[in-house]
Image (cartoon, grey):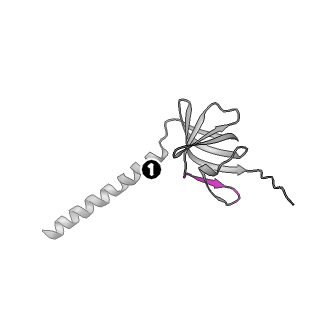
Amino acid sequence: MRTRRLLLILGTALWLLPLSAIGEWRQEMATANPILIESQIRDVALDGDTVVIHLQRQPYDILADRRQRVQALDGRCMVAEDLEAGDNIHMEGDLDHNVIYARHITLQLRVEHRTGF
């Protein structure tokens, strides 16, 4: 009797496991209105725990979590609040009316001017 219950529980768990993985994959892949943008940052503003980014020639506000990781091509460890005006970025997100919610940001180029040599 115990063995039968154990096999029934184990069989049910093994049957539900792939369904759980499929559900998680679909949540990651499902976006209402995906958008890709490559542009230069015009300005960056902090609003509580949210970073508001405006790009050159783009009418949309881009919202990112303050601690969202930003992948830098030169290997730096960055977060969204480290972005500056003049940075060139590649951004993947979801467009919702006039707002884009950033999912992934890559810093492509940052020009730094150093003085005092």
The C terminus lies in which quarter of the figure?
A: bottom right
Q: Residue furthest right?
A: 117
Q: Nearer the viewer, residue 39 or 48?
A: 48
The crowd level at tag 1 (other Cα within 10 Å; few <14, some 14-19, many 20+) is: few
Vertical placement of 46 versus 70: above or below? above
Q: Nearer the viewer, residue 26 or 12?
A: 26
Task: Determine which residue is flagged by label 1.
Answer: 25
91 lies left or right of 8:
right
Query: Which residue: 30% across, 57% down?
Result: 15
39 lies left or right of 28:
right
Query: Which residue: 66% across, 60% down?
Result: 76
Q: Position of residue 31 (x, y in %)?
A: 49, 40
Residue 22 forms part of the magenta stretch: no
Check disc 1 and give the amino acid type: Trp
Query: Which residue: 81% across, 55% down?
Result: 114
Q: Residue furthest left?
A: 1
Q: Which stretch is magenta?
A: 67-74
Q: Position of residue 13 (x, y in %)?
A: 29, 60
The N terminus lies in which quarter of the figure?
A: bottom left
Residue 71 forms part of the magenta stretch: yes
Q: Dot 1 lies on which element?
A: helix
85 lies left or right of 62:
right
